[in-house]
Image (cartoon, rainbow, N blue to C red):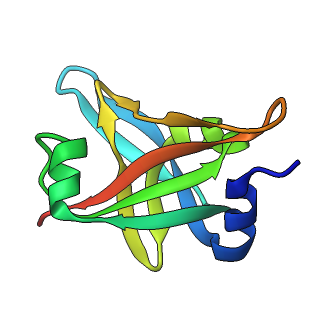
């Protein structure tokens, strides 16, 4: 039995690129950190737009230009937790983090090991 999100992923899923970042401490006394991004890994996702009002309600205290709600397969959890930036349609986004941890919610699946993850990505106001 297939989950409804499986059918939606097959028909409406788009490709996003996930950039994993590696931190290097330049000066331990000054706390200078340099982040180097690796080559992107492409995964399939369902991407929905959120309005600014929805963003203020769901992500309080963050000033954003654009916000997206994305669904990805559960098997990509470790990749997303290590992500530094996420690219969607040529624009760069950040994952919503609290206390340095990416906020990921589990969406239940039908069988063992199935399911989806839901998270918010956003671009900041410049």
On screen, residue 50 versus residue 117, left or right, reads left
Q: Is residue 16 placed above or below 60 in the rendered structure? A: below
Rendered location of residue 15, percent (x, y) = 62, 71
| Residue sitting at x 33%, y 28% | 100
The residue closer to the viewer here, 34 or 116, is 116
| Residue sitting at x 25%, y 43% | 58
Rendered location of residue 20, percent (x, y) = 54, 48
Most distant residue in the bottom direction:
90
The residue closer to the viewer here, 64 or 53, is 53
- On the image, which quarter does residue 75 sit in? top right
Count of labels shown?
A: 0
Most distant residue in the top direction:
29
Q: Is residue 60 placed above or below 90 in the rendered structure? A: above
| Residue sitting at x 47%, y 79% | 89
The residue closer to the viewer here, 77 or 39, is 77
Report the quarter where the C terminus lies. Answer: bottom left
The residue closer to the viewer here, 74 or 81, is 74
């Amino acid at each position: 039995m297939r989950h409804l999100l499986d059918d939606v992923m097959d028909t409406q899923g788009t490709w996003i690129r996930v950039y994993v970042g590696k931190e290097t401490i330049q000066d331990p006394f000054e706390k200078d950190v340099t982040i180097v991004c690796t080559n992107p890994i492409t995964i399939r996702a369902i991407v929905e737009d959120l309005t600014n009002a929805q963003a203020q309600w769901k992500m309080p205290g963050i000033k954003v230009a654009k916000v997206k709600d994305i669904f990805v397969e559960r098997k990509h959890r470790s990749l997303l937790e290590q992500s530094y930036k996420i690219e969607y349609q040529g624009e760069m986004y950040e994952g919503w983090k609290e206390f340095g941890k990416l906020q990921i919610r589990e969406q239940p699946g039908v069988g063992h090991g199935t399911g989806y993850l839901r998270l918010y990505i956003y671009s900041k106001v410049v």
